[in-house]
Image: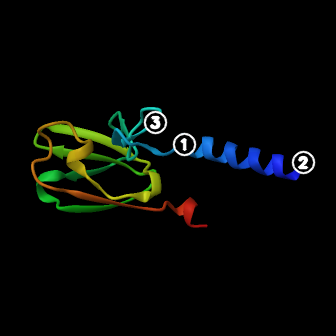
């Protein structure tokens, strides 16, 4: 009886974990489709604004929304990364917005630190 419950618990845990793992065919996406780095958002007045032409690296908290701009072009992203991985902005930004590497380092949010 205990062995059956333990085996079932392990199998259920494995199935649940598979839902949040990256898709091996596309390491930047989860199995159910979203990016492992977060999601694009509508521009927000509360978002920090960063000029990508003057930035080589950026520190953000998980859950933070940032608007990136280059000239008249803008792009807003909410960083909700799996495992707080760093990401090169070129991976998530629209084509033509970022020409050189801009690393975004994602740390735990205040609520995740407690």
Residue count near mark 2 (Cα–Cα under 10 Å), binned few <14, some 14–19, many ≥20: few
Compared with residue 105, is residue 96 higher up or lower down, i.e. above or below? above
Task: In the rendered structure, find residue 18 and report the number of the disc placed on it.
Answer: 1
Q: Are marks 1 and 3 in contact (CB under 8 Å)?
A: yes
Q: Earlier in the sequence, mark 1 or mark 3?
A: 1
Q: Earlier in the sequence, mark 1 or mark 2?
A: 2
Task: In the rendered structure, find residue 10 and report the number of the disc placed on it.
Answer: none
Q: Nearer the viewer, residue 5 or 111?
A: 5
Compared with residue 82, is residue 77 higher up or lower down, i.e. above or below? above
In the image, taking residue 17 as reference, residue 46 lies left or right, namely left
Residue count near mark 3 (Cα–Cα under 10 Å), binned few <14, some 14–19, many ≥20: some
Q: On the image, numbered disc 3 is attached to which residue?
A: 31
Q: Earlier in the sequence, mark 2 or mark 3?
A: 2
- Where residue 12 sits, quadrant-wise, is top right
Q: Quadrant of the C terminus?
A: bottom right
* Residue drawn at (53%, 63%) of the image: 110
């Amino acid at each position: 009886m205990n062995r059956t419950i333990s085996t079932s618990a392990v199998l259920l845990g494995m199935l649940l974990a598979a839902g949040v793992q990256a898709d091996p065919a596309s390491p930047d996406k989860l199995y159910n489709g979203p990016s492992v780095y977060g999601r694009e958002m509508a521009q927000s007045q509360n978002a920090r604004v960063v000029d990508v032409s003057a930035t080589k690296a950026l520190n953000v908290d998980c859950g933070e929304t940032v608007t990136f701009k280059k000239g008249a072009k803008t792009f807003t992203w909410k960083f909700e990364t799996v495992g707080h991985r760093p990401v090169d902005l070129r991976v998530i930004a629209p084509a033509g917005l970022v020409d050189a590497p801009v690393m975004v380092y994602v740390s735990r949010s205040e609520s995740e630190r407690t």
